[in-house]
């Protein structure tokens, strides 16, 4: 354990001692488990914590984060307020639980009003697995969205948009007696088959765009051979190619599941 970490832990312990051990603290462990208890002692990188009436040892190199009990209790209170408001379908109270910074970030990144996100979870509010905003660091009286949460929202939207484009192309194919579009998709599909070409956005790598790269002369190459990591849609418009009508994401990066975007 580094000197800096030892100092930090010692300072933390002093704060706990001054609190008089009256409030249980929350330990977020590196294996994903959470322990809530009162610190009894700390020595040589080992915490002795009283949890559920029993003493247990927690080693500092296995602890990701320690949240003071008073702060965690405040966060729990806000989360309970959110949950109760959700059961009442009270959009305004749920919105009031979220920090203004998080609302702004969500709307800028996800491109929809926070009210829409809140309304969309009502269908599963009776399920305990209902998607909840993550606690935002540094603001114990509000809840917010982590960067990981927002990135997953964007990923889900892009994958959904890819599915929408493929379904739209299949409808066009059926209407046109087995023929796919041979040029710019926006000229052919919009507005009869789709309101607009949906966006493609790869968080952390490519900005949002609805541009489609059209392959007109493929020289019998596969669509994947034209990947250049542009972050745009990639469409095979060559009727001589066996993959005519295929569309994919022109990106070589991976998503949160470790799969390349071009493989979807």
Image (cartoon, rainbow, N blue to C red):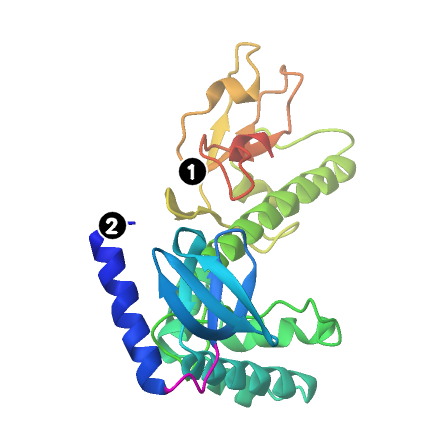
Residue 251 makes an appearance in the image = yes
* N-term mark: 1 or 2: 2
Question: Along the horizontal axis of the image, is 182 left or right of 206?
Answer: right
Residue 199 percent coordinates (x, y): 49, 50
Please rate how many residues cluster around mark 1, counting C-alpha atoms within 10 Å: few if below 14, some from 14 to 19, many from 20.
many
Q: Which residues are magenta?
A: 20-24
Q: Decide whether the magenta segment is chiefly helix, strand or loop.
A: loop
Question: Along the horizontal axis of the image, is 130 left or right of 48?
Answer: right
Kind of element beneath mark 1: loop
Residue 183 makes an appearance in the image = no
Label 1: which residue? 231
Residue 83 percent coordinates (x, y): 62, 82
Q: Nearer the viewer, residue 243 or 55?
A: 55
Kind of element beneath mark 2: loop
The answer to which quarter of the image holds residue 221 is top right
Q: Nearer the viewer, residue 4 or 136?
A: 4
Q: Where 81 falls versus 235 (above or below)? A: below
Residue 2, disc: 2
Callout 1 touching callout 2 (CB < 8 Å) = no
Residue 167 percent coordinates (x, y): 70, 43
Q: Where 171 falls versus 15 (above or below)? A: above
Please rate how many residues cluster around mark 2, counting C-alpha atoms within 10 Å: few if below 14, some from 14 to 19, many from 20.
few
Q: Nearer the viewer, mark 1 or mark 2?
A: 2
Who's the residue at 63% across and 29% down the image?
Answer: 246
Residue 64 percent coordinates (x, y): 42, 57
Residue lying farthest to the top in this orientation: 219
Q: Nearer the viewer, residue 78 or 100?
A: 78
């Amino acid at each position: 354990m580094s000197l800096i970490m030892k100092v930090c832990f010692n300072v933390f312990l002093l704060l706990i001692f001054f609190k008089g051990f009256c409030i249980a603290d929350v330990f977020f462990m590196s294996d994903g488990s959470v322990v809530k208890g009162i610190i009894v002692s700390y020595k040589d990188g080992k915490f002795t914590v009283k949890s559920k009436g029993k003493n247990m040892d927690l080693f500092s190199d296995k602890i990701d984060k320690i949240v003071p009990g008073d702060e965690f209790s405040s966060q729990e209170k806000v989360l309970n307020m959110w949950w109760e408001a959700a059961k009442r379908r009270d959009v305004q109270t749920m919105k009031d639980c979220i920090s203004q910074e998080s609302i702004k970030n969500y709307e800028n990144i996800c491109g929809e009003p926070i009210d829409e996100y809140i309304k969309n979870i009502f269908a599963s509010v009776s399920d305990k697995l209902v998607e909840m905003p993550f606690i935002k660091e540094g603001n114990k009286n509000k809840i917010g969205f982590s960067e990981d949460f927002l990135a997953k929202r964007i990923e889900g939207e892009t994958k959904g948009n890819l599915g929408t484009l493929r379904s739209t192309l299949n409808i066009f194919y059926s209407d046109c007696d087995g023929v796919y579009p041979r040029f710019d998709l926006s000229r052919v599909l919009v507005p009869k088959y789709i309101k607009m070409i949906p966006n493609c956005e790869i968080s952390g790598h490519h900005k949002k765009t609805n541009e489609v790269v059209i392959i007109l002369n493929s020289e019998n190459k596969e669509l994947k051979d034209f990947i250049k990591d542009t972050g745009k849609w990639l469409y095979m418009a060559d009727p001589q190619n066996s993959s005519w009508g295929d569309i994919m994401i022109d990106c070589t990066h991976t998503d949160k599941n470790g799969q390349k975007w071009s493989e979807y």
